[in-house]
């Protein structure tokens, strides 16, 4: 099945700096790549996603880029703020699962934004 | 529009007992997926139900089971609880034809 690896596991940045989290996947047929943010004690929330027919998607300070050839996708957060501090998860559909609820998640990145 | 509702939010059980967790999806969502979240293993897929049928299954033992009702509400059951079952159990709903998941707040299970 699909395998998703996420790096780094922890990331500390100064407020205002940029943060980049990278994920690699194994199934070249995967076509959907979401990013979830989970604040301490709260539920994971979808913050941005990208489908395989585009290379980049932006939403205000966050963006996701996809490199299908290299099988990796990245989350970019610009002008980081303390409220960006959270655990971020990437995911991809499990091999053969199509458009279903079966996602394979990366191990998560704990982002700390220092004021 | 109400979100995904999970009950109970917290529960404590002892080894050998069983537990049932409930999930009410967003109105109109026909797919309900269950995930286990632990510090060591991250988010792991348990199973997914769509139109009262199990559509996908993860790599968990048969002690973990679920079902979905005609109103799309879902329950998961864990029998013969083990210490290692202590985790946050998250339910997520989606419209059915897409894999855009909306998570509930979770049920935190502690097994003593």
Image (cartoon, coloured by chain):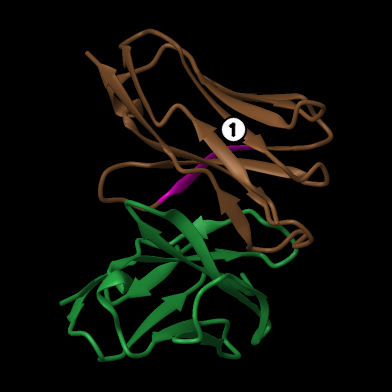
Chain colours: A brown, B green
Q: Label 1, secondary structure: give it.
A: strand
Residue A47, percent from left and from top: 52, 38
> Few, some or many C-alpha atoms within 10 Å of disc 1 (few <14, some 14-19, many ≥20)?
many
Seen at 38% across and 16% down, the residue is: A80
Pick the front one: A76 or A60: A76
Chain letter for the residue marked with disc 1 in the picture? A
Residue A27, located in which quarter of the rendered image? top right
Q: Indicate whether residue A31 is drawn in magenta.
A: no
The residue tagged 1 is A23
Residue B36, percent from left and from top: 42, 64
Q: In this picture, is A14 found above or below A25?
A: above
Q: In this orientation, does residue A34 appear?
A: yes
Is the magenta region chiefly helix, strand or loop?
Answer: strand
Q: In this orientation, does residue B27 appear?
A: no
Q: Is residue A92 left or right of residue B1?
A: right
Highlighted range, magenta: A44-49
Q: In this picture, is A11 found above or below A32?
A: above
Residue B11, located in which quarter of the rendered image? bottom left
Seen at 45% across and 83% down, the residue is: B76
In the rendered view of the protein, which quadrant contains the C terminus of chain B?
A: bottom left
Residue A6, percent from left and from top: 52, 35
The number of callouts visible is 1
Seen at 30% across and 70% down, the residue is: B84
């Amino acid at each position: 099945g699909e395998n998703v690896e996420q790096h780094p596991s922890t990331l500390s940045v100064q407020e205002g700096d940029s943060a980049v989290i990278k994920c690699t996947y194994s199934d070249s047929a995967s076509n959907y790549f979401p990013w979830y943010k989970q604040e301490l004690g709260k539920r994971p929330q979808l913050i941005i996603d990208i489908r395989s027919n585009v290379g980049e998607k932006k939403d205000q300070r966050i963006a996701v880029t996809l490199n299908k050839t290299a099988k990796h996708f990245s989350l970019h957060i610009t002008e980081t703020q303390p409220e960006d501090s959270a655990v971020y998860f990437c995911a991809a559909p499990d091999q053969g699962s199509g458009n279903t609820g079966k996602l394979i998640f990366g191990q998560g990145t704990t982002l700390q934004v220092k004021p | 529009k109400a979100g995904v509702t999970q009950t109970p939010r917290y529960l404590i059980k002892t080894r050998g007992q069983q537990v049932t967790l409930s999930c009410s999806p967003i109105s109109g969502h026909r797919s309900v997926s269950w995930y286990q979240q632990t510090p060591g293993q991250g988010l792991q897929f348990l199973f997914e139900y769509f139109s009262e049928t199990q559509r996908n299954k993860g790599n968990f033992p048969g002690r973990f089971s679920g079902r979905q009702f005609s109103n799309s509400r879902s329950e998961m059951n864990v029998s013969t609880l083990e210490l290692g079952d202590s985790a946050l159990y998250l339910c997520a709903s989606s419209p059915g034809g897409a894999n855009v998941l909306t998570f509930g707040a979770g049920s935190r299970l502690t097994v003593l």
